[in-house]
Structure formats: structure tokens, C-alpha cells
Image (spheres, coloured by chain):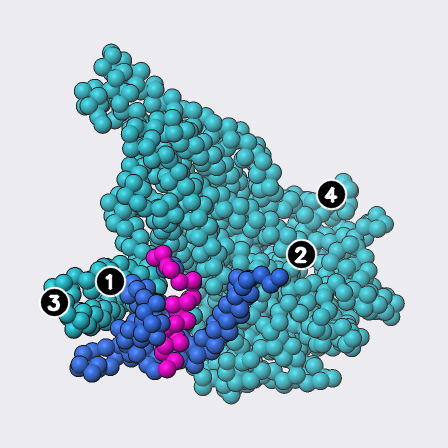
Chain colours: A blue, B cyan
Amino acid sequence: MGNRQPRDLFPGALEMMILRTLKRQPLHGYALVQRIKRDSDDLLQIEEGSLYPALQRLLKEGCVEAAWGVSSTNRRVRIYKLTRTGAKYLERQVSSFEQMLEGIARVLSPVKS
Amino acid sequence: MLEDLRLRVRSLFHRKAVENDLNDELRFHFEQQVEKLVQSGLPPAEARRQARLAIGTQDEIREEYRDSSGVRFLETLLQDIRFALRMMRKSPGFTAVAILTLALGIGANTAIFSVVDWLILRLPPVAKAEQITTLEAELLSGYYNNGFSYPAFEDIRRQSTAVFSDVAGAMDFQMDGLSIDGNNQPIWTSYVSGNFFQMMGLKPVLGSFIEPTPGKSVDDEPVLVLGYTFWKTHLGGDSRVIGKSVLINGHPVTIIGVAPKGFHGIASLMDVQGYLPLGMGIVTSDAKKDLVVDRKPPVLAIFARLKPRLTAKSVQPVLNVIAQRLSTQYPATDKCKSLFANPLDLFSPGTDPSTSGTLRLVSAVFLILAGLVLILACLNVASLLIARSSAREREMAVRAAVGAGRVRLIRQLLTESLLLALLGCAGGVVLGLLASRSLGSINLNTTIPFVLDFQFDWRVFADAFCVALFTAAVVGIAPALRATRRNLNNLLHERGRTATVARQRTRSALVVVQVGGSLMLLIVAGLFVRSLRNVEHANLGFDPSHVLNFTIDAHEAGYNEVQARDFFQNLLSCVHALPGIETASLAATTPMSYFSFGEELAIEGYQPPSNQQAPAAGYNAVSPGYFETMRIPILSGRGFLDSDSPTSPHVAVINKVMAERYWHGQNPIGRHFANTADPKNPIEVVGVTADSTTTDITSPSAPFVYLPLAQHLQNQTPVTLQLRTSLPLATANREVVDMIHSLSPAMPVSDVQTMIEAIDTLHGPMLFQIAAGLAASLGILGLALAIIGVYGVVSYGASQRTHEIGIRMALGAQRVQILKMIFGQGFFIVSGGTLLGVLAAAAIARLVGNFLVGVSPLDAITYLGAVFILTTVALLACYIPARRAMKVDPMVALRYE
């Protein structure tokens, strides 16, 4: 029951970014999109069609928790917050991601003569 | 995992709430987006358009969202179930037949299983029952004996401490008189050694148990432990009975406890109603005073608990040593080849390994027959499902065309058959419960507390449940695969006739097997029923009609031997004086009752061939007049007279088999024999009677001895008063019971019944009645299933050929030809099935042959009769669709489709 939408990101990247962003502070869905967009200097555009199912998956796995709150404009919003499980999961993901990045970087680096 | 489940369930039941939450969240998101776009300078309408484009359709998100919340699976399952229920409602006939068929198949199996479970599988509810063994001695004669003398029990107990953690003894099941607050009633008791309950690892439901007294197990502690059922049914489950003083055969004892529920004692066919200390049995019985030292009488059954990690086989060397030691030490009394420890499961149905072997075989036969019924039921439902799946081809094709995947379709079909199976299972459990309850309430024609405890336990349920699941899988998967395998185009554009024909052929083959199986069941049922008829019409050698029985127990009423003899003398003369009584007499036991006596004999002038067992005979102690009452002809010599008293020489009347076996054509009158247990007391033969059935209706006549009751009264209590009368039975009953009570108001009278009832025991025709009843039920079930099968396949075949029939009729075919055509298919099925069934029956009849009386396992009449019944009924089942086919209107048929 995975996401059937074609994705530009590699699997797990979206979740990683969500968790990373939530690590700084709890946010609602819209703010999450804005924050990721801003932090990536507009390079990454999160699709809403992927965001909410991803949040739902993270909820299920206990990586985030959600609570209904009120926004600054007095609207009912669902605020997502990183849990300890989520933090650990993020740490593991980031370190394996960095390893992978390093590997890729070495392979792609210009051949030394 | 749990969280996941919680969420799934929550999302299922609060789907509305969850969706509302999501809608709120998405709407907020959307509006934020619009606001941002408006702020960046777009007009509101354009901003909305762009926002919508960016976010995508909310429906898609919702789908995704549902997927990731796991709502999908359960939701589709519910959908499937709803759909399945709708399909079932749409064809109630099909549904009812399928569910009923499965229920009958499963019900028959649970009922039979509950009986087999009780007879063979279930161990008594004692702690670690698998560790408990029962000891058995192999005698020099090759016979096995599980009775031991008290001194032998003590010896074995002392010498086996290396392999057994504890050894307990229990005396035979016997009837005592219990007097509570002046009320007398019989109580069936077992005298047990002090460590019995501790060794079994039981806890009393109330009070305490008999104390284990190490080193001194024959104690005179006058206490009584009640059996649970007796306490509940006879004493109303009153907890105040603990500490109460009561009388057992006139001796005061104190009730100290109640045994746990479900524990019926170790002889598991009986319900022990009371447990007394072994010592009580010895002090209260005049004849048993010397039991503590006498090595002769085999009065105790020995139970031993194996030490952990030992098995009944592994302790054999130790038992061999003990047997050897006892044989050399006491060659006169304890000489035996060896000792064996049998696991309790071998023992539970009865003390005799040969009985348990028979029970196993009978159980196996009935399990096979019931299993066959279930297979037939499954075949039936499978062929119904196949027929229906072809009727639903179009539906499947359409659903596949609109995008339902094959897995999805199979899942739908499996859900349907699973639902059918579960409903069938529920029905089967109900039927099984009813059937085992009715089996459990069989009247065994005795006041002996037999246990027919066919309880519905978890294993029976697990069995039924597995059968249902198995059925669903077997029944459901094939049609599901079939229905979804078809080439879509083929189906949507034409009828795909070749496939239909192939399917029809598979179905016909299934029904052939079904008819064969049913015929086999019918034949087996017929063999059992004919056996029963033979048993019921067997020449018993006595005439049970117009004889009434009354069992009275003078011992229980507190009479001693002399008083009892006077009472019986008085009773007989008073009964004779009643009008309408032809003859009356007394006997220690009645033919085929649950009591029988037998002894080894030493016969004057007869030397048993070496390495053969000592001569033995069954016996009964009877009063003068017995042979007249029972109408057993005396061939030579005389019957008993009032002058055969305790002080006169001991005499006996023997049967013809005994005369021929031991005195080979010489005149046995005036010859002597003696009981080997009492060799100094010779008994003179004064008469020879014709042979009659004595202990078991199926056993060939064996040597039998009649002894005068007056000379053997001390062992013979209770006693049965038998009288031959032309009076209406109810009148005679009342008069005689009143008369007994006018002679002795406290005299217990039990088992008041006709002689015909009295011989209808497990040793008499009862087992045959039960077997014939069970077999007949299974046979009728099988027949019903076969009819449903034949009717289903033939009528389906006819409906498939409606078009063809129409053309034929339009071309001028006669109705007879159509009839022939339809019957042709039925005839093929029935003849194939008949052949199969006869072969199968001949194969299984060998197995049941041991239980047949006067009928060959290949009895031609039974086979022909069963074939005739099945063929007739099956062809009748073809007639209905054939008639329908003959009425086909050619015009309608041609326009069909």
C-alpha cells in the first residue's frame, strides 16, 4: 500500500525532510510545505498529494504525533510534532543517507590521474 | 502493531470523523495557499485555480490517505461480506442447501468426534495424566490380569520406588448402602488407598480428601469422600454435608470432602459416587477381614505415577525384576510371567486391552464413515458452487472488464464460500451438540451410574472449525480460480461452450464419486441394521417375555446373611401367593447384565492339556424355580430344591457346553468340581441345562454353572427377584414393590424393569442398536446428499441444454427422446456411482465385519437392496428436470439468449 504517485525524490526522502523540519519546531501541514520550500531555496517542491499520506504513515509508525490546535488566524489546524521514535529514526536515516551521499560523491568525482 | 490496529479500527468506525479531519486540514491548506497567491498579486479566482492545480484533486489525496491509514483492507472486506450476504439472499435455495449440507457433514463429525474423544482421546482430569500408569500382570496361562492382592500391592509399592514416584491402589467399583438422616440409598463406591487423591494430584472442591498415611495405608479411618455428580444430584450440592455423620452399610462414617467436577474415578465408564479408605472396605465386609494378609484375592487395581522423564516402556526392566522376585517368593499365589505398566489412555475405556482395541476399531470405522459424509457434503457444495460460478461467469467478466483484478475477484468468491462455511460450521456445531446430547442421554437400562460424558470441549470445537476452514478452502478455491480464469473476450462475446461442457463433466465426475460414497454408507448402514435384526431375533436360550425384574439389596438394608436368607424365603412364598404370578425366583445376576461372575475350576477327572489355562466357567447363583421362570429346559438330572440349603452338600447345575467340554459324552451327573480358590469344598453336579446366552449376546456359548443362591448368598448381594406373570406389567410392578415394602419398609428396590428391558444392555443388543442407529443416520445423510447432487447436476445439465432441446423439438423430436436424453446423463452418473460404491463398500466391509452378527460383509441382499434404493431415488431425482425439459416450448427455447 505504498504511494503510487511517481516521485522525483528517492523513497524515504520526503519522510526524512518532514522529520528534519519538525525537529526544529512543531508545524502544521501547510507550514511544513512552506518551510521545506524555503529551506531548500525553492529547489524542492513538496506535493500536497504526497505530504498528507506521508504524515499519516509517520503517525502510524509513531514517528510524529499530531494534535489539533488553533492557528494565528484562529483556524482549527493539526500540528505535527516529532516524537522520540521519530528523532531516532531520523538520526539513522540521516547517517545512512550521508554514507550513501559520500559513496555517490566518490564515484562521481573526477578521476584522479 | 497495536497502535496500527487501533488506528485501523478507529478509522473504520470513525471514518466520517477521520475524513472530516482530513477535509479540515486540506481546506486550511488550500486557503493558506490561495491567500498567499492573492498576496503575491493574483486575482482571487486565478489564485484559487492555481492552488487547486498545485494541490491536485482532493479525492486523490483522500484515496492515498485511506491507503496509508490501512482503511482499505477492512473496508473492502466489509464490502465483500456485504456483497456476499446480498448474493446469498438473492439465491436462498442455494444458500440453504449449501449451509445445511455443510452443517450436516460437520455436525455428524463433531458428534462422532465427541464420542471418540470421550472413549479414547480424553484422559481423566488428573494432574499430568500422561505420567499415570496402571499395572497389569501376565499370567502363566497367557491371560492378563489387572487385579492384585493387598500384600502384592504393598510389595510392588515398596520395590518400585526407583521408577514410580507414588503407587496407589483402588478396590473394585461396588454398591453400598448409604444412610443419611434415616434415608437409605444405594451409592456406588470405590475403596482407595490413602494416597490415592494425592497421587492423582487432585484438589477437593469442598472439604478435604482421605489422608495419606505413609507406611500404613489400610487404616480404619471412617471417612467418605463424595463424587461431584452424586453430591450435586443426590444431595443438592449442599456444602453443609461436610462433617456430617452417615452410615455406610450400617457403619458410621463422616463425610469429609467432595471430589472435583469431571473426575469420575479411574474406571472411566463409571461415575464413582463415593470414595472410602481401603481399610473401610476390609473392616465393613465380613468376608474381607483377612484381605490384608491374604495373597489370593485379586481385589486391587494398582495405579503408579512414573517419575519425570520415564515412560511406561522404560520401566519394564524394573517391573521384570519385581515380577521375578514375587514369583519366586510366593510361587503359589504370585506366580506370573511379568508385570506391565500401561499408560492410562490404553486403560480408560475399560480394564481390558482387548476392549480398548475393539473400541479403537469401532471408533475408527465411525470416524471414517463420518469423514466420508463430510467429504460428500464438501463435494456437494463444491459442485453447487461450480454450477453457480458458471451462472455468474458474466457477472465476473463484467466486473473484470470494469477493472477488478483477478486477486480481487478471487477474494470476493473466497469470502462468499468462507461465509458459507462459517455459517455451515455454526449450524454443524449446533447439530453436533444436539446429537451428542442425545447420544449422552441413551438409557442404559441400569441404575449403575455410567458416565456418558460427551462434552463439547474446545477440541471438538477446534475440530469443527478446522473442518469448516478446510471446507471453505477446498470448496471455494477451485470454483474461484475457474470463474476468474476465463478469457474475457471469449466470455463477453460468445458462450464458450467447450469450457461449459468440460465443467459439466467435472461436475458429473464429482457426483459419481458422491453417489458411490452414499451407496457405500447405505450398504454399511444396511449391514449394521441387519446385524441388529439378527441380534434381536437371536435364540437366547431363555424366554424374556412376560418376566419382570426387581433388584433388592438386603445387605444395604442392614441384614446379615441369616436374616437375608430368611427374608428371601419369606419373600418368595409371599410373591407366589399373589394372584397372576406363574413362577418367581431369585438370581444373583441376569443374563447380559453389567454383572457377571466367573471362576477357575478344578474338575474331577479332567486334566487340562499342558500349557493350556485352567478350566473356567461363568456362574450365577439362583433360587429354586429359576429355570421355570426363565424357561431354560433341564436336559437331565434336576433343578434346585428348597432342600439345597447351606448345611446340605454343595450342588450345581451345569450347561450343555460345560458337560461336553469337561466330561466328553460321559454322564456328568454325580461328578464333582471345585472352585480353585476353595478347593476343599467340592460341588456335585445334579443337573444339565440347555445352553443359553449368559454374559454377552455375541459370544458363543461357554461353560456355565448355576449354584443354589442359598449356598452362596454371602457374596451375592444385591439379588434380582424375577417373576413370570400374565398380569399387566404396571399392576404387577406396583403390587410386588408394595409387598416387598410391607415385608421390610427400608428395603431398597431398584432396576424395576421387564426382562426385555433388562437384557437391553451394552452386552445385549444395545451396542448394535447404537451402531445401527448411527450407521443408519449416516446412510440416510449420504442418501440425501446424493439426491441433492444428482438432482443438481442433472437439472443444471438440462437447463444448459434448453436451447438444444428447443431445436430438437422444433425439428420434431418426441418427448420420449428428450426424456431419454436427460435420463441418459443421470443413468451414467448412477451406474458409475453404483460400481464405485459397491467396490468401496466391499473394501470397508472387511473392517466392519468384526461387528456384524449373522451377516456376511458381502451380504448380497444388503448390497442389492441398497443399490435398488439408491438407484430408484436417484432416478426419481432425474425425473423432475426431465419433466421440465419435456415441457420446453420450442419457440421460447429458440428465442432464449
In the image, which disc is placed on residue B660?
4
Nearer the camera: disc 1 or disc 4: 1
Query: Gap in Å between the C-alphas at discs 4 and 2?
Result: 30 Å
Query: Gap in Å between the C-alphas at discs 3 and 1?
Result: 15 Å
Is residue B705 depicted above or below B9 in this figure? above
In the image, which disc is placed on residue B44?
3
Closer to the chain start, of discs 1 and 4, is 1
**Residue at the spot 15% in from the left edge and 64% down from the top edge:** B48
Nearer the camera: disc 4 or disc 2: 2
The reply to whether callout 1 and callout 4 are in contact (CB within 8 Å) is no
Q: Is residue B144 left or right of residue B402?
A: right
Query: Gap in Å between the C-alphas at discs 1 and 4?
Result: 111 Å
Mark 2 Cα within 10 Å, few/some/many (few <14, many 20+)?
Answer: some
Indicate the position of residue B687 as horizontal and vertical percent values.
Answer: 68, 49
- Give the camera-side residue of A2 and B231: A2
Identity of the amino acid at label 4? Glu
According to the picture, the residue beneath numbered tag 1 turns out to be B54
Count numbered badges in the picture: 4
Identity of the amino acid at label 2? Pro
Asked if the magenta segment contains residue A17, the reply would be yes
According to the picture, the residue beneath numbered tag 2 turns out to be B353
Query: Gap in Å between the C-alphas at discs 3 and 2?
Result: 96 Å
